[in-house]
Amino acid sequence: MSPENSTSPEGITYETLLRFEETLKPPFRRAFESGRVDLLPLPSLDPDSDDPLARAAAKGRAVFDEKNGRLVVPLWLEGKPLGLLVVWGVSAERLTPAVSPFLSALVEAGLEMARLRLAAETDGLTGLANEAALDNALVGALSRLTPSKVRGRPALDRQGGGQGLSILALEPEGLGGLVDRFGRRFADRLLKEVARRVRELGPPVLCAARAGYCFLLLLEGGAAVVRELAARLRREVKSLELAPAEGPPWPGGLRMGASTVDAQSWEGGALAVEAAAAFKARAQRALGCSGRVGLEEVLFFSEIVDKAGRLTELLPLNRLRLNLGRLHGLGDGERFQVMGVEQDGGGRDAPKAEIMVVSVGEEESVAEVVSLDDPTWNLRPGDRLRRLGHEAGSQAEAGLEMVVSLSGRELKVILDEVTGLACHRSFMTLFNALGAGQEPFSAVLVRLEGLEGIREVCGRVGADSLMAALAAVGREVLPAPELLGRFAPDTLAALLPGVEAEAARDLAAEVLARLSRKLERGLRAGVSFHPCPGFTAADALDNAAKALVHAGFLEPGTVVIFDAVSLNISGDALFNQGRLSEAVAEYERALLLSPAEPNVLNSLGVCYGHLGQTDKAMSHFERALAAAPHDYMAHYNLGYALMGQGRLAEARQRLEESLDLDPEHADTLFQLGRLAQGEGRLAQAQDLLARAAQRPDCRRAVFRHLGEVMAASGRFAEAEDAFKQAVKANPHDASALSSLAGLYLERGANLEIALSLARRAGELEPQAPRHLRVTAQALVSLGKLEEAAETLRQAQAAHPQDPFLALQMGKVEAARGQKAAARDEFWRALALEPNLQAAKEGLAALEMD
C-alpha cells in the first residue's frame, strides 16, 4: 500500500523502504563489501540503551556494534526516523573519520532513489498507486500465479485449490454528477476519504490504485475474499459524513465490479501483458454493468450475463436490444426470460416473455421474442433479464447460410460472419446429426490462444482477422470444409467422418504448421474419436475439449489425441476445485481407457485419501507402483499415507525411494526433513530441509522447520536467517513469527522487535497459548512485569489446562516479589504436569529465599 502523500518527505515510511529495499541495499553492499544488509523497523528510541539498534535510532547517527561486527545505520528524513539498515561483516579498521560524510551521502542518495520510485508509482491526489504501478503489479502477480506442471500433480498432503487473484473495481456512487453540480473540490475530498478507507484494508490487498473516479484493488484470493472485503469497505464508506457546501449529504454508496482467476484454471503463457489487460478490463466491465443497473452488491464478471442483463430498446419485427455483448461473455442463441413485477400488486418478479439472442455485438446484442407469457403485458426498456440456458444461437440477421447434406438429411446451416464457417448452434446441429449415425468419425478442436487479450490490445478487427486466417487454413487442409465451425470465440471445430484419430492428428498438425508460418501466436489442438470405449458419440466434442486442455500442458503447436492422461488432467482440475467425487468419477473413466496408467492410479489414490478412504488410497498407490516402479510421486504419496498412519519406518523407506528417483523433489525433501527432525536426527534434518529450501517450488513452511532445526543445533545466526525467510515467504506464519521472537529473546537482542513479532503471532492465532507465552516473555525482558502478568492472566483464563502458562506466571510473580502467588502458580503447574522439572526448581528457589 502506498503512503498518503508521495510528494512530501512525510510520504516516505518504513513500508515504503521495505517495498524498495532492493534499491536501497546494493550501494551499501558495494561500499562495505558486505554479503548481508538487513532493513529493520524502528525499535524503541533509547539513547542510553545497551542495544545498538535502539541507540542508533534515538541518536540519528550510525553505531558500530563491535561485538557482532555490524554497522547500524539509521535512516532519517528531515528529522524523522524511518528504519534501520544493518550492514554485517564490518571491521573497526574500515570506519575511519572519512566514512561519516560518505555514509551520510549514501543514506541521502538511497532515500532519494526511494522517493523518486515512489513518486513515479503514486497517485498525487490519494497517495495510492497509479494505474501504471497497478499494471506492473498485476503482470508480476499473474506470472507468479502460473502453476508448475510438476507441482500440478495431486499429492496426498495437498488440498486442491489455490488462492488465486482478484481485481475489485469500485467507484463512489454518483461521483460524476457531484463533479457537475459542486465542482472538483468536493469530488477530490470524497476520493481522498475513500482512498483512506482503502489503505486501511491491509492484507490481502496486494496493490491499490486510482484510475480517474475508479479505484482498482489487486487482491490475493478468490470470490469469498472479494465479497468479505467489499462488504467491509461498503460499511466503512457508508459511515462517512460528507456534504458539499450547498447540497444534501453524500449517501455513501459504492458501485463494485470484480474479476477473479485461480491458479489451477490460469494457463499462463508468454502474453502476460495482454492477459493482465484482459483481466483488468473484465473487472472494469463488471463495474460498468453494476453502475448501469444499480446493483448494491459486488458484481463479478462471470455474473454479468446472469445478474446485469437489461432490455434497453424495442426494435421493429419483434426484436429487442440488450445491454450485453461478447465482451460480457454472451453467446449466440442464449435464451432469457424478460422479467416484470406482477400486476396483482404482490411485488414479485414474474416472466413477461422468452427471448433468444440472434446477433451478438461487442457490448450490445439483438434478441428476438420467442413467446409472450401474457400478451397483455408490454415489454419496456429497463426490464430485467433472467438467463434460461446456454444454447448456441444464430446469426441469421447476417443473411449467411448454406445447406449441408449429412447422414441422409438436408441441414440448413447459418454461417459465422467472421470466419464464414458454421456458427456454434449450426455446428452442434451437424454434430448431433453425425453422431446419430453409425459411421465412425473424429472431432478436432483448434484454439488460437490469448484471443481475448489480443482484442483488448489490438481491437476487434485485429482479433477477427486472426480467426479468419485460421478458418481459411482449415478449409484448405481439412477434407470436409462444410463440417467446420466456430466452436468458441477463439476455437475452430471440425468433424471428420471416416477419419481415424491418427490421421485426424496429422491433419490438425498441418493446420497448425501452416498457420504458425503466418502468425506468431500460440496454437494447440485436441482430437477425439468415435467409437471410444466407455463413451458415446455425444461425448466426442467434450473429449476433444479435454484433449485440448491436455495440449495446453505441452509446447505450443502440439496436437493431442484424447486418452487417459487427458481425463487425468480433467480429473486434476476437479480435484483442485475441491470436487472430489466428480474427480473420482473422471479418474475411473480414465482407467477404462488405460487400466494401468500410473498417473491416474496415483491421482485416484490421492482423492480417496482426501475422502478418508485410506485403504482404497493405499491400494491405488500400490497399483501405481506396480505399473510404474520408478514413479517418484507414487512412492511419495504412499510414504505420506504411511506417515499419517504412524508407520514411520515404512514411510521413510518409501520417501527415500522417491528421493532416489527425483533427488530434487522439494516435497520429498521436506517430509524426510520433518521425519528426521521429529526423531532428533538434526544434522540429517538440516541437510534435507536446506536442500528443500533451495528449490523454487518448495513449501513456505520449509524455512520455519529449517529455523527450528538450526536453533535446536545451537546455530542461532542461521536460525534467524531461516525464520526471517519464513516470515518473508509467508507473513501470516504465526509459528515462524513466534519462533523468531523467541530466538531474539534467547539472545537478549532486538527486544522491542521480538515483542512486536509475538503480538503479531497472537493476532494471527489468538487461540494458541504459545504466542501468549512468548509475548509475556518479551514483556518480562523489557521489564514490563505488570503487563506480562496481565497477559498471562488472560492466557490462563483461555487455557486453564496449560501447565507452561502456570509455570511462566510463577516466574513472573517471583520476579515481582509475590512469593505466595508464585508458589501457588508453581504448584498449579505441577498439578497439571507432575514431571515439570522447572516448576520444582522454582519452588526450591523460593524456599532458599
Image (tube, rainbow, N blue to C red):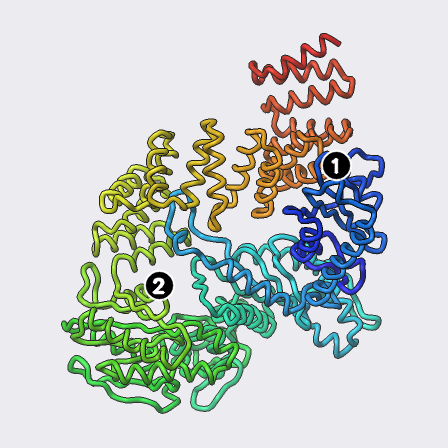
Question: For mark 2, does the 10 Å Cα neighbourhood hold few (<14), some (14 to 19), or many (20 or more) residues?
Answer: few
* Residue ID for mark 1: 66
Splitting the image into 4 quarters, where does residue 542 fall? bottom left
Q: Is residue 359 left or right of residue 633?
A: right
Question: For mark 1, does the 10 Å Cα neighbourhood hold few (<14), some (14 to 19), or many (20 or more) residues?
Answer: few
- Give SS at disc 2: loop
User: Residue 774: where, in percent of width, then height?
Assistant: 65, 31
Q: In the rendered image of this protein, does residue 584 appear above or below residue 831?
A: below
User: Residue 271: where, in percent of width, then height?
Assistant: 48, 70
Disc 1 versus disc 2: nearer the observer: 1
Q: Is residue 289 left or right of residue 665?
A: right
The residue drawn where x is 55% and y is 29% is: 713
- Looking at the rendered structure, the kind of residue marked 1 is Glu
Q: Is residue 191 left or right of residue 433?
A: right
- Looking at the rendered structure, the kind of residue marked 2 is Leu
* Residue ID for mark 2: 554
- Tell which of 310 and 174 is nearer to you: 174
- In the current view of this chain or complex, which residue is farthest to the left? 438
Splitting the image into 4 quarters, where does residue 675 fall? top left
Query: Can you say which quadrant of the picture contains the N terminus?
Result: bottom right
